[in-house]
């Protein structure tokens, strides 16, 4: 099928895409309540399972927009989605990153709400019904997200809110402080609010979702969360698997927020503290990489930079060890990682057993969040 061109409503350069089936036919149908947006890059191995989780939803008033972001495995991807083509709208573009892929889907969406889903994650069957019930219970709500079950490979390793606890209402301040952390694949959000906030920033390839949540909150979008597990999140796939790069991406978002958002003096101070913390953590990540690679002088410099940002006895001791006995330090570090791996395996097994039991129970789709950011207890 020949590609056609669609001019974005933001006045950006034209985007080439290939829709299947014809979007003109889809436009003749009544608009759905929800548009499911799935960006896909090299996702052929997992996309079928992801789509099956969408089409097994107990809520049915939705459309699915799948955007192929220049995947290297396009032939395999298209073979995997072929059984679903009569139930989704498929777009292709050159590789431009997840923000661009999501934005293409958002601009083409016809639903009042957007449901975001990464191509390697899964929804439990009641997810959309539960989230739409939350909107029905509170007309002022603009975005709601939910808890998730974490998988490493095929093993459950715990629930998302155990790793990133949610404290109090989800506001600009609590998002900046990371007291509330939004899980993208659980988000259902007002399309109008996303358009007003300016869509995803296409210049950002990491933590682009965090940037959008901050802008939505700054524009007055009210955000809530549901403590029930509704999503299965796969660890180790996609962009979030590189710790150092994710920290750099998060730091870039904080710098952008400080420069462009209308922050209060206390919020600006919070951002400064977060940036200092992230800069120190980035240096430590580099030090670990250098130590593992036997680049001892580079590791020592990185530790010294981390110590200059946030002085600590342990950092001073590490710098001393790197100067006088670096090989012994590397052996000790590798031994430490081996012990941690064994402990982590056991704790993940216990957490997975508990999390799997909780997540796979069927629950009625009743809303759990309350007005003014108060939430039901776990």
Image (cartoon, helix red, strand yellow):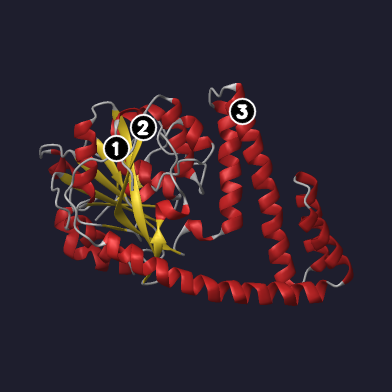
Image position of 319 (left or right of 361): right
Can residue 44 be seen here?
Answer: no
Q: Could you tell me which residue is drawn at 55 percent across and 59 percent down?
A: 242
Provide the residue designation for mark 2.
373
Q: Earlier in the sequence, mark 1 or mark 3?
A: 3
Image position of 207 (left or right of 30): right
Q: Nearer the viewer, mark 1 or mark 3?
A: 1
Provide the residue designation for mark 3.
268
Image position of 336 (left or right of 357): right
Quadrant of the snapshot with the N terminus: bottom left
Q: Quadrant of residue 250?
A: top right
Measure the C-alpha gap from mark 2 to mark 3: 23 Å
Q: Residues within 10 Å of mark 1 (few under 14, many from 20)?
A: many
Provide the residue designation for mark 1.
369
Marks 1 & 2, CB-CB < 8 Å contact: yes
Q: Residue furthest front?
A: 377
Measure the C-alpha gap from mark 1 to mark 3: 29 Å
Q: Quadrant of residue 168?
A: top left
Q: Earlier in the sequence, mark 2 or mark 3?
A: 3
Give the camera-side residue of 255 and 340.
340
Q: Is residue 126 above or below residue 272?
A: below
Element on which disc 1 rests:
loop
Give the camera-side residue of 127 and 54.
127
Q: Could you tell me which residue is drawn at 81 percent across and 68 percent down?
A: 296
Give the camera-side residue of 124 and 41.
124
Q: Residues within 10 Å of mark 2 (few under 14, many from 20)?
A: some
Image position of 77 (left or right of 367): right
């Amino acid at each position: 099928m020949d590609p056609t061109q669609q001019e974005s409503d933001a006045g950006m350069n034209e985007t080439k895409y290939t829709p299947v089936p014809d979007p003109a036919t889809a436009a003749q149908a009544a608009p759905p309540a929800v548009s499911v947006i799935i960006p896909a890059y090299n996702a052929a191995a997992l996309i079928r399972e992801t789509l099956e989780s969408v089409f097994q939803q107990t809520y049915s008033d939705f459309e699915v927009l799948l955007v192929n972001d220049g995947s290297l495995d396009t032939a395999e991807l298209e073979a995997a989605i072929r059984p679903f083509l009569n139930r989704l709208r498929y777009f292709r573009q050159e590789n431009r990153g997840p923000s661009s892929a999501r934005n293409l889907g958002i601009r083409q969406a016809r639903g009042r709400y957007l449901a975001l889903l990464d191509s390697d994650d899964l929804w439990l069957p009641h997810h959309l019904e539960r989230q739409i019930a939350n909107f029905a219970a509170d007309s002022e709500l603009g975005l709601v997200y939910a808890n998730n079950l974490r998988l490493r490979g095929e093993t459950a390793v715990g629930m998302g809110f155990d790793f990133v606890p949610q404290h109090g209402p989800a506001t600009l301040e609590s998002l900046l402080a990371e007291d509330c952390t939004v899980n993208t694949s659980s988000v259902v959000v007002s399309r109008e609010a996303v358009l007003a906030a300016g869509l995803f920033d296409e210049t950002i390839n990491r933590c682009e979702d965090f940037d959008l949540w901050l802008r939505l909150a700054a524009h007055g979008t009210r955000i809530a969360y549901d403590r029930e597990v509704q999503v299965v999140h796969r660890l180790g796939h996609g962009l979030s698997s590189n710790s150092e790069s994710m920290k750099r991406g998060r730091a870039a978002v904080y710098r952008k927020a400080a420069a462009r958002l209308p922050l209060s003096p206390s919020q600006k101070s919070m951002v400064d503290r977060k940036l200092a913390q992230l800069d120190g953590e980035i240096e430590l990540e580099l030090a670990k990489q250098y130590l593992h690679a036997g680049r001892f002088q580079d590791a020592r410099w990185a530790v010294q930079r981390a110590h200059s940002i946030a002085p600590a006895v342990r950092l001073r001791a590490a710098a001393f060890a790197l100067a006088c006995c670096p090989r012994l330090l590397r052996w000790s570090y590798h031994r430490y990682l081996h012990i941690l791996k064994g402990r982590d395996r056991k704790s993940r097994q216990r957490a997975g057993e508990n999390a799997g039991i909780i997540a796979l129970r069927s629950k009625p789709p009743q809303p759990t969040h309350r007005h003014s950011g108060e939430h039901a207890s776990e």
